[in-house]
Amino acid sequence: MIAAQQATQSSTIHVDAAIVAPNCTIQIVSAIHPTPVEYTHCEPHHAIAMQRQRKQAFSTGRYLIEGAEKRFEDIGRVLVLPANVPLEVRAEGGPTQAVRCIFNQDAYARITGLDELVHPNEMVGCLDVKSPRITDTLARLAGEAEAPGFASRVLAEALGTSLMVEIARYVNDLQPRSTIQRGGLARRTHRQIIEYVETQNGTPSLSDLAKLTGLSRRHLSRAFKQTTGQTIYDYVEQVRFNRAANMLADTDLLIKDIAFKLGFTCSSSFSVAFRRACGETPKSFRKRMRPGAPDEIASPLSLAA
């Protein structure tokens, strides 16, 4: 059993829900930070966390350990916190919420056979973990912590164990920056794809992006994965989730109108996809991000229908 321990920083962290299992502890944690915010966070045990608020305007960090990247790098939606390694954070701040899985070093070593979670010169890859399996598992754990069902503790233990294995696999595939081989996307092409995906309604297809860049679909897929560490499909879905979260948090659009803007055929398919991505429905996410907002109000799209 792992006792919860919070980071010493400028904001109080609240544990909103938790499941304590023999090898791991699952927590939903929230905080309201100053804007902007800078602090150092250190966990006594290994942890992996997935943010559950809208994407911040900026969120950067660096691990304070010999051999790690000294520059501040972007923090993604999912990040790994090795035990006793301070993480210095500079971010937009404001309200945040995350689901995290905490597990001690002995449990990780026993289950994976590895004494070390990640080597310092590979830690930069842990600031932005791009793994659909890890994201899906954390979303399931978040849903279970908030609405426990039959044998929740047993399920959390099983999912926590699988999460340790997935983390070990992810870390095993990391490469120090100095050893990354050529063959990825040109910087201009990478930026072209990012700008296109982030400004388009709906979901651009691989064929759309291949036509945009003038590359074959096969070469584009391979080069994008080598450059970013994730598939084009996973990247497009990540952008779509971020846009959904922003519209739910920052606008009064009806959920069905948000679904339409994002290329979903109906609000129910959007709700299923959103819940799979973060462990809660669009409606509950909006209520959490905007406690005083009305459930549904008329929107220009609805009035035009």
Image (tube, rainbow, N blue to C red):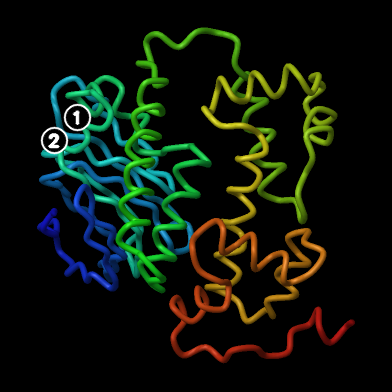
Q: Are marks 2 and 1 in contact (CB under 8 Å)?
A: yes
Which amino acid type is shown beneath numbered disc 1?
Ala
For label 1, the crowd category at 10 Å Cα-Cα, with few meaning under 14, some 14 to 19 and many 20 or more, is some
Q: Tell me the residue at 14%/29% (across/down).
A: 65
Q: CA distance from mark 2 to mark 1?
A: 5 Å
| Residue 81 shown left or right of residue 167 in the figure | left
Residue situated in front as seen by the camera: 278 or 39 = 278
- Badge 2 crowding class, 10 Å Cα cut-off, few under 14, some 14 to 19, many 20 or more, is few
Location of residue 52 by image quarter: bottom left
Residue 295 percent location from the top left of the image: 59, 89
Q: Between 37 and 279, which is closer to the camera in this rendering?
A: 279
The percent coordinates of residue 87 (x first, y second) are 20, 42
Q: Position of residue 229 (x, y in %)?
A: 52, 27
Furthest residue in direction right, as rendered: 305
**Residue toward you, 296 or 158:** 158
Please report the residue visible at 33 percent of the width from the left and 50 percent of the height from the top.
49
Residue 303 at x, y percent in the picture? 84, 87
Identify residue for label 2.
Answer: 106
Residue at mark 1: 109
Image quadrant in which the C terminus is located: bottom right
Instruction: Please state the total of marks drawn on the protein image.
Output: 2
Q: SS at mark 2?
A: helix
Q: Residue at x 21, y 47 (%)?
A: 23
Q: Is residue 287 above or below residue 208?
A: below
Amino acid residing under circle 2? Asp
| Residue 283 vertical placement versus 37 (above, below) | below
Considering the numbered disc 1 on the image, is that residue within a helix, a strand or a loop? Answer: helix
Locate the N terminus by quadrant: bottom left
Q: Which mark is residue 145?
A: none
In the rendered view, tell whether residue 138 sits above or below residue 107. below
